[in-house]
């Protein structure tokens, strides 16, 4: 969640104060992501340092202790549009801890991989239940809340579907991970087994 | 509060000898009034068998099934049919509405089959359609309704009258996400009015509308969710 870009988006509508930014941010994200005012001001300071926002008040108001207002700059607008129009950089997907746990569970003696899968599935589904109850308790036409909750639900559901698929695959076929340690054979390359199996692509 | 549906050590075997298929093994489940339970599991895990046995459409090979406190295994076929007409509502994946009847007539049908006067049945049917937001469609035939509207009518038929047990097998069928959500919301609301519900689905997103989710694997109930903490826990625990 990019607080930085969310603040730029809110300022693109016109100058705003820090407290106002916090309230609008929470309202528009269905209050799912709480934001403290310190985070807002720290982000604003960085944005100001980078020339993406500037103080909107005259000096007298600031000196009188009235809240400081901010407005977006031209480079700030460009940055916002750039962010909105560019997909996430998925060239290097993060290592997925769940994937690693399942891969590792297959190999650990005394551990049943299907039980490991179920523990994670239950946890994810319970989390989904909590998100869904936010929707269930809200009015059906609370679109902002529904959009935010849907985004979380589909993300988590993706992990559940991966677990479901992993379970069926592992029941159908034994996962065979060749030993990573090189054989005592000088002619064999000592690359890890999984990489070796992928062969020419690496 | 006593459970509307109780399954004790229920097993179901299809065929015999080496070809026997154990669809359910020693399943225990109790569903209270007002509770919606989702059954999740991969294909062939026994989800649908569990539902047809709970709905008295099939008999268990072993174990007992109680609906409203009565042992359905000890009932005559005639009494079981009466129980289905009066107390149990079914929602199927493909809606199963009768094409030659209007929405209101489809909803009134189980009541009329049970001997209720047509005028009274129609009044209850219109009430049910109203609750499901389909009142304006009462005189339309199923072919003139959208998928979402048909499923509303099917749910109205499942909840009409004094039904206490609501059983749904993949009730969202081929509906899109938003219409599927409406279906789950309606089922949840129906249970909120006091019915006990069991919904079979392989989609976590839909199952998450239930109060409790049980997981089937190879015909056995292997796990279930615990009562989830309120949504406020999401705000303090950071990301999921």
Image: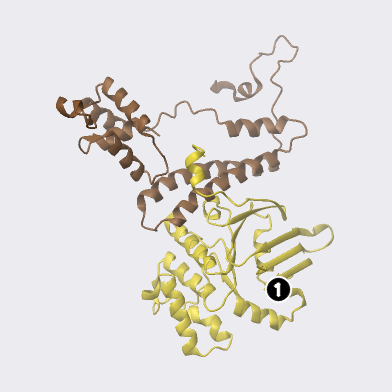
**Which of the chains is yellow?**
B
Q: In the image, residue A186 lies at what x, y percent? A: 72, 9
Q: Residue at x 49, y 79 (%)?
A: B106
**Corner quadrant of residue A7:** top left
Figure colour of chain A = brown
Helix, strand or loop at mark 1? loop
Which residue is at the front of the view, B150 or B157? B157
Q: Residue at x 69, y 20 (%)?
A: A180
Q: In the image, residue A5 lies at what x, y percent? A: 32, 32
Mark 1 sits on what residue? Answer: B69
Relative to residue B2, is residue A82 drawn left or right? left
Protein chain holding label 1: B
Relative to residue B200, is residue B59 drawn left or right? right
**Corner quadrant of residue A73:** top left
Q: In the image, residue A132 lies at what x, y percent? A: 49, 52
Q: Is residue A28 above or below residue A46?
A: below
């Amino acid at each position: 969640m990019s607080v930085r870009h969310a603040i730029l988006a809110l300022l693109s509508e016109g100058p705003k104060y820090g407290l106002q930014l916090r309230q609008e941010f929470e309202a528009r994200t269905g209050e799912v992501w709480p934001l403290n005012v310190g985070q807002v001001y720290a982000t604003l300071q960085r944005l100001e340092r980078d020339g993406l926002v500037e103080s909107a008040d005259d000096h007298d108001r600031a000196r009188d202790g009235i809240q400081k207002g901010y407005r977006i700059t031209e480079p700030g607008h460009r940055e916002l549009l750039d962010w909105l129009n560019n997909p996430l950089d998925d060239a290097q997907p993060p290592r997925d801890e769940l994937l690693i746990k399942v891969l590792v569970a297959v190999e650990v003696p005394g551990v049943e991989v299907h039980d490991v899968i179920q523990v994670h599935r239950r946890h994810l589904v319970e989390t989904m239940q909590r998100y869904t109850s936010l929707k269930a308790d809200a009015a059906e036409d609370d679109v902002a809340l529904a959009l935010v909750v849907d985004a979380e639900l589909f993300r988590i559901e993706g992990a559940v579907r991966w677990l479901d698929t992993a379970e069926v695959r592992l029941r159908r076929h034994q996962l065979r991970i060749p030993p990573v340690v090189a054989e005592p054979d000088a002619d064999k390359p000592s690359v890890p087994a999984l990489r070796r199996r992928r062969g020419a692509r690496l | 509060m006593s459970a509307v549906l109780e399954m004790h050590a229920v097993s179901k075997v299809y065929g015999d000898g080496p070809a026997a298929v154990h669809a359910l093994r020693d399943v225990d489940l109790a569903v209270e009034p007002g509770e919606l339970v989702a059954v999740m599991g991969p294909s062939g895990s026994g989800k649908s068998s569990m539902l047809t046995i709970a709905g008295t459409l099939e008999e268990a090979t072993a174990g007992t099934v109680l609906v409203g406190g009565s042992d359905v295994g000890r009932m005559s076929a005639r009494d079981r049919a009466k129980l289905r007409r009066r107390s149990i509502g079914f929602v199927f994946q493909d809606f199963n509405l009768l094409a030659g009847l209007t929405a209101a007539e489809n909803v009134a049908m189980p009541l009329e089959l049970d001997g209720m006067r047509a005028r009274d049945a129609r009044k209850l049917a219109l009430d049910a359609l109203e609750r499901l937001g389909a009142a304006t469609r009462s005189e339309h035939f199923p072919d003139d309704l959208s998928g979402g509207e048909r499923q509303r009518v099917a749910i109205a038929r499942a909840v009409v009258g004094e039904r206490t047990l609501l059983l749904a097998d993949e009730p969202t069928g081929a509906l899109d996400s938003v219409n599927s959500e409406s279906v789950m919301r309606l089922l949840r609301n129906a249970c909120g009015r006091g019915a006990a519900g069991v919904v079979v689905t392989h989609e976590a997103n839909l199952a998450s509308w239930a109060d409790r989710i049980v997981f089937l694997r190879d015909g056995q109930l292997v796990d279930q969710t615990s009562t989830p903490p309120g949504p406020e826990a999401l705000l303090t625990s950071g990301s999921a």
